[in-house]
Every structure is written in structure tokens, then in C-alpha cells.
Image: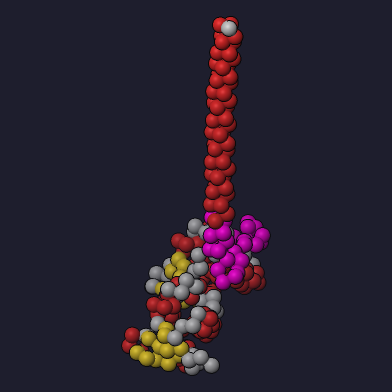
Amino acid sequence: MEKEKEKRKVKGEDQAADTEKEGIDVESELRRLEEEVKMESRERMMEASTQQEQTMSVNKTQLLGKTTFECPDWANLPWMKRKPSRAEDVDSWLRDWCDLVLKWCQLDVNVHHVVGLKDFKVSKPFDALPEMELREILQHLVDRGLAKWIGKDKTVARIMWRSLEEWANDVYQWAYNNGVEMLDRFAIQGANKDFSSLPKPDIEGVLEVMVKKKMLKWIDKKHEQAKLIYQ
């Protein structure tokens, strides 16, 4: 009888030990699974963050649905970075570079309305052009009525890659699409559109054009407040 009790006691202890071991194994397995879930969660969060950054980058560089600026191959050719020595080649050289400046101002990540020589010196492909060539290119734009110098030293220019009439149409379309009834300079500047960063005199000019084209009527001209006229 005593031997039988001893056997049952030993058996019970073994079963308890096995149960305890199984409990430890289950606990370890649960911890392992928990760590895997946490790791997968972190990976998903990192992936989502990366996708969000990519989306923000695309949104920034595709203003108004346009693509980003791409430098043409010819702009990197060594002989295009100097004014041609032959007089008959100068006009086409100036025209190519002027057209590229206009395109860059419009399609760069940060839309440019006012640019200085220092801006070109840190922007490809213009950074490889000597200052004398840059000045001549800008002067050619001025001569074509597509730019005007700001200041007597002629180091900064207002680049007009769209006319005030075109900007007026853009502002009117934006206002129409967003149900804007009252318009002033601050509303235009806060619209987060290409026209929002126009210099103050240009925005005033856009408002005047809109009034002349019967898109607006002045409510308080002194404070540049106007009411939209919807056709």
C-alpha cells in the first residue's frame, strides 16, 4: 500500500512538472507571437509613413497637374554654356535658354515669379553658365517683354511666364470651383496655387484685369475687396 501511494505521489509530481513545463512553453510561445505582431505592426507603420512621404512629394512637385522640370540634354553640352562666337548663332542660343528659363520658372518644385542671379547659380543647369551669359539671357527676356528688372543693379528680375490676363482666368476659375463670393489679395495669396506667390503689384494687376473683364466688381477698391460676378 505504501509503495502504491509513493508511486502515485511521484506520478503526480511528474504530471505537475509536465504541466508547469507546458505552461512555461505556452507562455514563451505567446511572448514570441506578441513580438512578431509588434514587429509586423512597426513594419506596416514604417511602410505607411514612407508612402505618405512619397505622396506628399508628388503633390508638391505636381502643382496644378503639371510635371516637374526636366533638364534637356542640350543644356548640359559644354558649348551651350557659353555664348556662341558666331553672330548668326547667338539668336537661337538666346532663344533656347530663354525658353528654358520660362519652363523652369513654371515647372520647378518651387514656382518662380521673381528670380535673381544667385538663384540661377544654385539651380541646374543654369549654375554652369557664367554671370555675363545669365545677364544677357535675362536681358533678352526683358527685351521680349517676358521679364522686367527689379532694381537698378539688374541682379533680380520678375519673370512673366504667364500674362496677367491668363492669371486672371486662373483666379476666376479657382474662385468659381470653390464657391468664392468675395475676393481680395489675401484670398488669392492663401489659395495655395501658382498665382498665390505672385508679387503684390501683379496680384493688384490681376484684380484690375478681372474688373475690366467683368469677372469682379469693386466693393471697396481702397482695400482691394471685390465681389465675384458669375456668368
Q: Main secondary structure of the magenta part?
A: helix
The N terminus is located in which quarter? top right
Residue 162 at x, y = what percent?
54, 78
Q: Point out the stretch of residues depicted in magenta.
A: 53-81
Q: Please, which colouring scheme is shown?
A: secondary structure
Q: Is residue 149 visible?
A: no
Image label count = 0
Q: Residue at x 37, y 91 (%)?
A: 219
Work out whether residue 126 or residue 34 is closer to the camera in this orientation and state it: 34
Residue 118 at x, y = what percent?
45, 61
Residue 157 part of the magenta-drawn span: no
Q: Is residue 47 above or below residue 75?
A: above
Residue 66 at x, y = what percent?
60, 69
Q: Is residue 120 above or below residue 223?
A: above
Work out whether residue 174 or residue 142 is closer to the camera in this orientation and state it: 174
Work out whether residue 104 or residue 149 is closer to the camera in this orientation and state it: 104
Q: Residue at x 39, y 77 (%)?
A: 186
Side of 225 where 91 appears, left or right? right
Q: Is residue 122 visible?
A: yes
Residue 59 part of the magenta-drawn span: yes
Q: Is residue 52 above or below residue 3?
A: below
Residue 37 at x, y = what percent?
56, 41
Question: Furthest-left residue in view?
Answer: 222
Work out whether residue 219 or residue 25 is closer to the camera in this orientation and state it: 25
Rendered image quadrant of residue 223: bottom left
Question: Furthest-front residue in view?
Answer: 1
Q: Residue at x 49, y 69 (%)?
A: 112
